[in-house]
Image (spheres, helix red, strand yellow):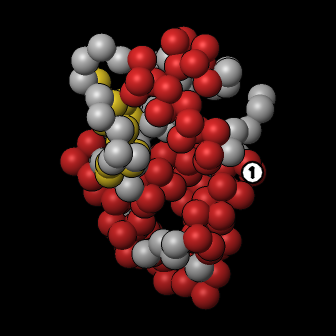
Amino acid sequence: MRVYTPDELRRFLEGVDAALLGKAEVVVIGGAVERARQATGLAVPFAQSGVAYGPAELESRLERALPHLERLAVKVPEKHDLVLMKVVRGDEHDLQAIEAIHQRSPLDLETLLDRYQGEMGAAIIDPRRLKGHVLTLVERLFPEQLDIVEARLRKRGT
């Protein structure tokens, strides 16, 4: 699968905006619309996702991207929410993406842990597996905090 540059995605979403007849909102975790594909020449995959697990309050923290668009309100998950969405799957590609997010804009460990413990209970994944993914993330991003986090999660039963 092709990886699109931020500029290509911006151009694509500008094409979506230009093709719309009325106002629309989209939460982008990845995607696009056929007329925009034709207008930009970019075959960006764009579809409704049936499966995406994130923190329970994710929608209340969505952030506006590309505010210059007139018809299309593009919303993206706040970085801690996006990281937790990637942690659910927890494959190497996701962990590398999380490391890149952290390098661009450092994540706050306390925010990640609070959201994991308070908002990730509905994720359709074995809780032990999810906990393992979280601990792998902590080990990679905050290795000096791993023992403290393990103790915290044991104490709270998560």
Q: Is residue 121 visible?
A: no
Q: Provide the secondary structure element on which disc 1 rests.
A: helix
Label 1 Cα crowd, 10 Å radius (few <14 / some 14-19 / many 20+): few
Residue at numbered disc 1: 92
- Rendered residue at 67%/21% (across/down): 41
- Rendered residue at 24%/23% (across/down): 23
Pinpoint residue 132: horizontal percent, then vertical percent: 59, 57
- Rendered residue at 68%/45% (across/down): 5
Pinpoint residue 11: horizontal percent, then vertical percent: 56, 36
Side (left or right) of 48 relative to 62: right
Pinpoint residue 45: horizontal percent, then vertical percent: 61, 22
Query: Does residue 62 sit above or below 80 in this rendering?
Result: above
Q: Quadrant of the N terminus?
A: top right
| Residue sitting nearer the eye, 58 or 46 | 46
Query: Does residue 88 sit above or below 28 in this rendering?
Result: below
Count all numbered tags in the image, as a single digit.
Answer: 1
Q: Quadrant of residue 56?
A: top left
Q: Amino acid at mark 1?
A: Glu
Q: Is residue 5 visible?
A: yes
Q: Quadrant of residue 28?
A: top left
Q: Quadrant of the C terminus?
A: bottom left
Query: Does residue 48 sit above or below 27 in this rendering?
Result: above
Side (left or right) of 92 relative to 72: right
